[in-house]
Image: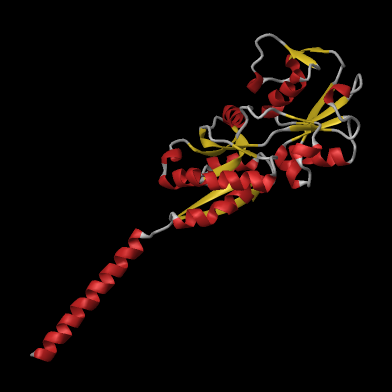
Amino acid sequence: MRKKGILGLLAIAATAFLLVGCGKSSSSKTTTITVGASAVPHAQILKHIQPELKKEGVNLKIKVFQDYVLPNKALASKELDANYFQHIPFLDNWNKENHGTLVSAGAVHLEPIGVYSKKVKNLKNLKDGATVLVSSNVADYGRVLTIFKDAGLITLKKGTKLTAASFDDIKTNKKHLKFKHSYEAKLMPQFYKNNEGDAVVINANYAVQSGLNPSKDAITLEKSDSPYANIIAVRKGDQNKPAIKKLMKALRSKSTQTWIKKKYKGAILPVSGN
């Protein structure tokens, strides 16, 4: 009887151990999310926070895209849980053209767009009739126009909304600058290196990816109070999902902001706004 009693107690203890073990497994269940991103700096920043998210129970998978066309399509079709490559004016324009409902989960950093030139060291020194090469990214036109307006080279028509502006909104152009804007954004660094045009406008991510340092190599950069901060985009309603909130918390943490400043030496600026 004593032997059977001991065996019974051992069986109960083993069962209890298994139940506790199962309980731990359930409570530590991880959630996997896939985020599409441009290679630089977006994918690099996401890779930096992977260990932190893992501790929070989020397995972050990163899918790298080389253009600005596919990431939103992939997000809308549920191939991704979020993407990280664009600013709100770009997202608004995409939603408008594609009847989309993608939304921002929050801003992370600013990539100051810049003007590069091998022919002049100051924007104001561009010759009369100079050619300025700009990408075909309509959402960036307002940024480009702002730079040239602030330099006193152009004025814009009254009532022009910069986030929706186009080159048709130029009122005066005292140096008769020719803005050519039919090129893919990723090609702009190569145009600069080939010394094409008199000036080339390059997005910071493509500049950094090609070995340029915007803060040193650009003859001028947009101001830091620009409304074009890069965001995490998600499908409407998903911004409240726990995994997305943890993603945003990690991206906006002080340690991540410090890492961004150190890594990109001012070429990429962390932001704290929405």
* Nearer to me, 263 or 248: 263
Residue depicted at 75% across the width and 32% down the height: 114
Residue depicted at 58% across the width and 28% down the height: 92
In the displayed structure image, the side of residue 5 where residue 26 appears, left or right = right
Residue depicted at 57% across the width and 30% down the height: 95
Which quadrant would residue 271 be assigned to in this image? top right
In the image, farthest residue toward the left: 1
Q: Is residue 37 visible?
A: no
Give how far across and how far down residue 263 sits, in percent: 67, 48
* Nearer to me, 253 or 166: 253
Q: How is the image coloured?
A: secondary structure
Q: Relative to 77, is 159 above or below?
A: above
In the displayed structure image, the side of residue 105 where residue 172 appears, left or right = right
In the image, farthest residue toward the top: 158
In the displayed structure image, the side of residue 71 where residue 21 appears, left or right = left
Residue depicted at 17% across the width and 86% down the height: 7
Give how far across and how far down residue 61 sits, in percent: 55, 54
Give how far across and how far down residue 170 sits, in percent: 76, 15
Which quadrant would residue 191 be assigned to in this image? top right
Q: Quadrant of the N terminus?
A: bottom left
Q: Relative to 142, is 13 above or below?
A: below
* Nearer to me, 73 or 33: 33
